[in-house]
Amino acid sequence: MTAKQSTQPKLRVSGATKVYNTRSGDLTAIDRCSLDVMDGEIVSIVGPSGCGKTTLLWSMSGLHGLSSGEVLLDGVPVTGPNPEIGLVFQEANLLPWRDLDANINFPFEIKGTKPDRAWINELLHRVGLDGFGGRYPRELSGGMQQRAALVRALSYKPSLLLMDEPFGALDAFTREEMNRLVEEIWMDTHTTIVLITHSIEEAIFLSDRVVVMSPRPGRVASIHEIPFPRPRSLDIMTSSEVFNLMNTIKMEIVGARQSRYPQGGTAASPQPARAAE
Amino acid sequence: MSETDAIPEFESKGAGASDVGITNMSALTSGPGIKSVREVVAIVLVAVIVIGGTEALLNIFAVPQYVLPKPSEIAVALVTEFPLIAPHLGHTLVELFGGFAIGASVGLILAAVITQFPFAEKIVTPYILLLVTTPMLALVPLLILRFGFGYEPRIIAVALASGPMVMINAATGFRRVDQAKIALARSYGASTQIFWKVRAPMALPMIFVGLMVGSIFGLLTAVGAEMVGGGFGLGNRLTSYSSMIQMPQFFAVVLILSILGILIYVFFFLMGKKFASWEA
């Protein structure tokens, strides 16, 4: 089994193309995207807004089909929702009329299976949510809600976790806390993770590889290896290598920015008055 | 497959976008809550002053009973006449519950079904609006011609008045589609469960609003229909007492109707609080 896994990617996206038929004509969201994710790997997808990241992730999850190309999970085509895949959405996406316990039971209710209480309790303990089972989402902070969503996604032990900008709505500190939590959970479970993020720092902190996508129609523009060992300390994250990597990726996404003004700090500063202050 | 191919772009939504903003929910989820003994005392005091003041003023100015009976006279009439009024209250309740049960069920089912087919909804909506805006009392004389002076015309009128109200509000609820929550359910393999596990709970607060408004409309129509024709019901008592200038009895019936209306409101308020308080 190990020999097989070393050659066969956990997730293979090949030639994925998705065209939306909209009223104003066809819209190519992603165009011939190909990507292999190995077992136990964490891969981040970054790219400019509207480049089809979410479309790509949804295709991986089987939530919608592709116009052409295919997605293979363990070599088997993904054609619909798959019990091996866990999804974490933008914002926690908890059901507000259910308390935390009922929210975590939701996947099992739909699937008609029995929840593994011991595992769920362990997860809840891990994310610091024990004792909150009777609380409703509105009674939880944004970070707690997203942690609950993470527990919900992991509750049925998926072998692949897909996360769509999971921490985008959180403040910077909570977000870092969540990143450490994901790292910790990965250290325990080695679940394969694909995540979309707008934060390059988050992408570098979490990933083995960062995939940069081009503007619409989304294509895989480049892939960066992030070679640092885990757990990744603050020292690593503040190193010059990480700094350079961040700038390289940022440059790729934003492009070399051309300002209308002369590039900063020249002698002919147009604001002499401010210098006097 | 239209749902499957929906563009999954809800990035532009701000924080809390999952809570679809609905303002008229305040009828259900926010009401004046009594917090302290001081408030209770104040409320009772004001009530005593209003009722006692009315009594005193009517006494001082010697207002004849047929113009406006004193609160004490109304209270006495309520107690002494109640055995006579009670059967009529029963008739009104039968009409109200019967008509509302039919109207609300049809309205709920129609709302749930029709919102799944936007095209059909567009075709049906004008007729529903017509039913909502037309006072169903106008049809009562016609219904009496056809069905006589029994329960039937009244129950039909109540159903016609409350059903569309329930439907139009419930439909608003069912239309509140949160793609992310539906996608969540679908990612676990849900298909038919989406209706019961996502759409219906999401519509519930608006359903309660519809039930509340619908039942009040039903009460209105039941009493109105009773005033138009037929020998029983609280509406019939109103016309009867007023024609005999028995004003204390007349106001006793009005008081019973007010209490009935308040009870309906409180019932749905509490139901909303219990099952739909997450909306707040």
Image: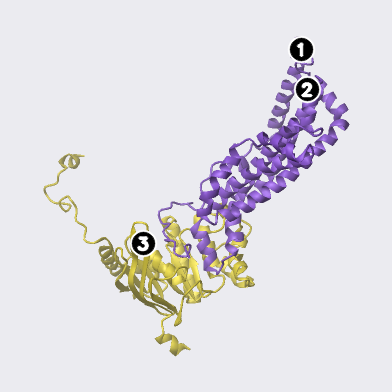
Q: Residue at x 44, y 88 (%)?
A: A4
Q: Is residue A273 above or below residue A247?
A: above
Labels 2 and 1 positioned on one and the same chain: yes
Secondary element at tag 2: helix
In the structure shown, which secondary structural element does the residue marked by tag 1 occupy?
A: loop
Q: Colour of chain A?
A: yellow
The quadrant where residue A228 appears: bottom left
Residues at marks 1 and 3, common chain?
no
Residue B262 lies in what quarter of the image? top right
Q: Which residue is mark 2?
A: B242
Q: Residue at x 78, y 16 (%)?
A: B66
Q: Colour of chain B?
A: purple
Of discs 1 and 3, which sits in the foreground? 1
Left or right of residue B176, residue A25 in this image: left
Q: Is residue B228 left or right of residue B277?
A: right
Instruction: Name the residue beneath numbered marker 3.
Output: A199
Quick one: label 2 or label 1, which is nearer the N terminus? 1
Residue farthest top in this picture: B61
Could you tell me the amino acid type at mark 2? Ser
Q: Chain of mark 3?
A: A
Image quarter in which the C terminus of chain A is found: top left
A83 lies left or right of A275: right
User: How far apart are the two marked residues, 1 and 3, measured between alpha carbons?
Assistant: 79 Å
Q: Residue at x 55, y 69 (%)?
A: B189
Q: Is residue B52 visible?
A: yes
CB of mark 1 within 8 Å of CB of mark 3?
no
Per the rendering, the mark at residue B63 is: 1
> Which residue sits furthest front?
B146
Q: Nearer the viewer, mark 2 or mark 1?
A: 2
Which of A89/B33 is in front? A89
Q: Is residue A112 above or below residue B128?
A: below
Q: Is residue A262 above or below residue B44?
A: below
